[in-house]
Amino acid sequence: MKKYFLFDLDGTLTDPKVGITTCVQYALHSFGIEEPDLDKLEPFIGPPLKDSFMEFYGMDERQAGEAVEKYRERFSDKGLFENEIYPGIARMLQILSGKGFRLAVASSKPTVFVEKILEHFGIRQYFKAVVGSELDGSRSSKDQVVMAALHQLFGDKPILCNEVYMIGDRRFDVEGARAMRVESVGVTYGYGGMEELREAHADYIVESVEELQEFLLRELCEVQPKGFMGVIGPMLFPFLLFMMIRQVVANGAMWLAVAVEPHVPPGLWQWLYYRDTETEALGYTGNLGSIMHALSYAVAGIALLYTALPVIREAKKRMALSHLRREHSRNYIIALLTTVGAVLGLNLLFDLTGITNSSATYRAVAQSQLSASLAVGLICYGIVTPLAEELIFRGIVYNELKRNYRLPLAMVVSALLFGLYHMNLVQGGYGFIMGLLMVYLYEYFGSFLWPVLVHMLANSLAYVLGYTSVADSFIHSWSTTIVCLAVTIVGVKLLDSDKRKLKGTVAE
């Protein structure tokens, strides 16, 4: 959990456009350069002034230093207060400070000016440290400013980089954060804009002060006691409805299958029915059994849509603040390879260790499912069933758990319930592990489509493995099992590392 927030000043806490641009205009005038359009001087907001004069007007170091002096000549008297605090900032700082977060300012503006601006707007009391550049030109780069702010915040304690956010509106803020190995939050309501922040690879991006406040507070997870039924009810009632509708539809499908049997054409009849040679009793082939199974899931899933969709939409809204950064395409590939590795590795592991033969219930379920044709099985068990189960388990159960409990506990409990739901050791163990992977990727990408995709892929691969008798194939070996499980572990580690889940500290 993040406990320390470093804020840039210009373009993040306050809008300094008038003061900065008119002072730049004043400095340029002293060099005989006239720039009547203040909008063209907005790039000066954020980066060190000396660098900006050199970059945008081709000044050498001496001229840039003189321009900075002229800038400060006007800024110290007038420009300093030609400034506005963004609406909602003062209230946000008050809330964050009241919640126990430790706040600091890390600005490229000279510290003496930063202090005066914070006092002017009545927000100085919220910051444990205020760090800017120096008037003599030292500590001018953003990484130096961030480093000094971290040292002041943590004092004699080790600097816990994984507990810090650097919040700013320009690429310089992102680069300064990265140099000190802390995560960055870009704000687009300032002067950098979405594209600049994306190109700088900001870890997170928010578009308003309200979004920033919600983002920074999102990990507190303050849960109000609801009582046992207040927590269990939103999960239990939809689950019971799901199970009841499945049973009713399954019974109705069996009655319908018997009723229409005399009218089924001979060619199709043999595909759906058979008669016991001894008793002449009517039976269902694996195809019809799978179709009736899928029908019960489909109807139950449709019945849950009214309940599940609002929960899924609300969860998506909460997750959106953590997933505004553009995801690298390689992470999608890594996630898919991780899923394939888990499915193959677990199926091989259970088979090689004899776990699959230890459960008569599992063998009966597998025999029933695999008696259908490959196409029917893939549609019924690889598409329809996963979609319906995701609506109840990740859509409702997991999201309701996450509302009331910490994220790790919600992930484990939802996966455990998913495993128990299968009512046998083999599918239960497999369901628990895959359930963990599904909620992990759900949280990682912030999209409900991911657990649905992973579930479909897992069921389809497992069905194909069973249908083609993996025990007789060349991949049925311990070496293949170890490789597949290693791919899964490495894949998760790669995904974690790309999210910059830093574990270390920076020494004083």
Image: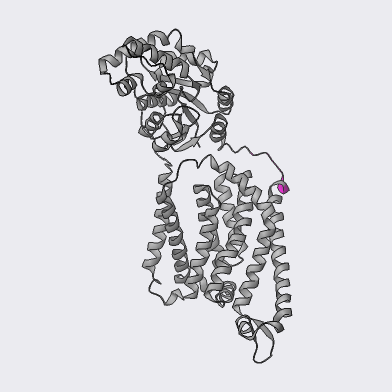
Visible residue check, residue 354 = no
SS majority, magenta: loop
Image height of 320 relative to 167, above or below: below
**Residue nearer the viewer, 179 or 41:** 41
Question: What residue is at 56 percent from the left and 64 percent from the top?
Answer: 383
Tell me, yes or no, whether the highlighted magenta stretch contains residue 224: yes
Q: Position of residue 343 (x, y in %)?
A: 47, 63
Q: Can residue 457 be seen in this view?
A: yes
Left or right position of 447 against 231:
left
In the displayed structure, does residue 376 sit left or right of residue 61? right
Direction from residue 190 to residue 236 in the image, left or right = right
Percent of width and height locating residue 120:
52, 13
What is the quadrant of the C terminus in the image? top left
Tell which of 41 and 11 is nearer to you: 41
Would you place residue 101 above or below residue 362 in this image? above
Q: What stretch is highlighted in magenta?
A: 223-229
Please identify the quarter of the rendering in which residue 483 is found.
Answer: bottom left
Q: Is residue 310 magenta?
A: no
Residue 223 location in percent, x, y?
64, 39
- Out of 450 and 441, give the one closest to the viewer: 450
Rendered image quadrant of residue 219? top right
> Residue visible at 51% across and 71% down?
356
Task: Return the x and y of residue 361 as percentages of the image width and height.
Answer: 60, 72
